[in-house]
Image: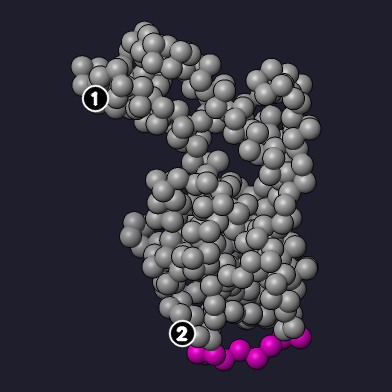
Amino acid sequence: MVRAMKANRFPQWRGFEQVPAGCLLDQVVELKDSLGFAYERSSDFYKDFHRHERLMIVLPRGACAMEVRTRSPQQVFRVDGSSALIVPANLEHDDESISALYDTLALYPDDKVLSRVFEREKISPRMVNELVENLRVVKRSPQLNCAIESFFSEARVPALDRDEESISFYYRRVLREVFREAVFKLQQKPLADSSMTQAKFTAESLVERALQVIEVNLFTPMKISEIGRACGASPSTLLRVFRRELGASPADYIRRRRLEESRRLLQSGDYSVSEIATRIGYESAGAFSEAYKQLFGTSPSKENSPAVPFEENENV
């Protein structure tokens, strides 16, 4: 059944002052509290340039595909059922369906909810700034797709009689998975060159800079020459100072850090052993298991416990 649509029927957040162009078939907008969301289903959907007061996460469903355009700078982002889009607060943009049917969920968490997700996921302040200040497309993982569908089926988003506790749980689960994928993508950014010269670095500052480069690009294949270039040092100087200060080569350090990160992923219970092996750069689960056992004295499968519900009983 098509619901009657009226202009100005929602709380007056910027971006919801008018009904979008097209034939709006269904619309559910909840902007009363910290877990704001909007679900819109339409044909020929178009929403002219507007802003939202909160960060927005766009999640198309099914075969829906859409474009989001910005004015300053002028950019076009395509997003569909295989991706999600993070849109910073107060960024002027428009939305247009490029598929026959527009079927999209958008989340609008407040700063308090975002802070709790970032804290729980141990996302650094520098990375948080990257996530909330730049518009970016994120590839959807199987875990994120599952979280989105759970939001619809179990929290019953299109229905009028909503279970608020379920809404809260699945809402934050979607946020967690979106930002996990966004952080993973950021960690794969190409190494940046530096114009700084080797003479500008002391032994201590060179190691610190190298560690920063490694952490930002932890899951990106890195050569010692690339790390050295980003730090303004020759490979031989970096290798010598690294071994003297940390007692290990850059390659050994990176290998250990990736395994340490894999332990956190295993204990979350959200990913299989083979998925984690691929994520941290191992060609096979067997090679990953052998390296993991060598470092931690136990097999990864023994630490791959089921996920604990995410703040299930905590009020927002």
The image shows residue 88 at horizontal and vertical percentages of 43, 61
Image coords of residue 228 (percent x, y): 36, 18
The structure residue drawn at horizontal position 60% and vertical position 54%, both measured from the top left corner, is: 176
Relative to 25, say whether 112 is above or below.
above
Do the CB atoms of the residues marked 2 and 1 lie less than 8 Å apart?
no
* 75, 308: nearer the viewer: 308
Is disc 2 surrounded by few (<14), some (14 to 19) or many (20+) residues within 10 Å? few
Does the rendering let one see residue 70?
A: yes
Up-down relation of residue 37 to residue 251 (above or below): below
Point out the stretch of residues depicted in magenta: 1-9
Q: Tell me which amino acid carries mark 1.
A: Met
- Residue 282 found in image quarter: top right
Q: Give percent across and percent down for residue 77.
A: 49, 55
Q: Measuring 56% from the left and 48% from the top, which residue is drawn there?
A: 121
Amino acid beneath label 2: Gln
The residue depicted at 40 percent of the width and 31 percent of the height is 212
- Please report whichever mark, 2 or 1, sits nearer to the chain's N-terminal start: 2
Name the residue carrying label 1: 196
The residue beneath circle 2 is 12
